[in-house]
Image (cartoon, rainbow, N blue to C red):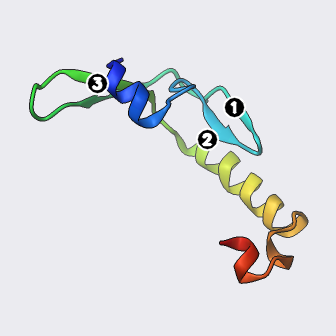
Amino acid sequence: MSEIVKQAYDIRHPDRFFIGGEWIKPSTTSVFDIINPVTEERTAQFVEARAADVDRAITAAREAFDSGPWPRLTPVERA
């Protein structure tokens, strides 16, 4: 991965998803490339989310919203 991309985005785990407060392995090994349109070089590679990964993320988000502090925060606190 390009050093510029690492610095610009601080990508720590391009091979995992941050779901439910932790970095988890994806349900697949499929990846996709990020291509620099100027140089046509691959600047990064990330895992590809599948339906199972999306379902886990949605479930975690719903749980966080229903049981976490978010719905009780004021708009100022949310910002």
| Residue 57 x %, y % | 67, 49
> On the image, numbered disc 3 is attached to which residue?
43
Q: Amino acid at mark 3?
A: Thr
Rendered image quadrant of residue 23 = top right
The quarter in which the C terminus is drawn is bottom right
Q: Earlier in the sequence, mark 1 or mark 3?
A: 1
Front residue (pair 38, 24): 38
Q: Which amino acid type is marked by label 2?
A: Asp
Residue 45 in the figure: left or right of residue 70 = left
* Residue matched to label 1: 23
Contact, mark 2 vs mark 1 (Cβ under 8 Å): no
Give me the residue at 17% from left, 21% from top.
Answer: 41
Q: Nearer the viewer, residue 59 or 73?
A: 73
Q: Residue at x 87, y 67 (%)?
A: 69
Give the residue drawn at x 81%, y 76%. Answer: 71
- The amino acid type found where label 1 is placed reads Trp
Nearer-the-camera pick, 46 or 13 = 13
Position of 16 with respect to 49 (left or right) is right
Q: Which residue is mark 2?
A: 53
Kind of element beneath mark 3? strand
Left or right: where does residue 33 sit relative to residue 56? left
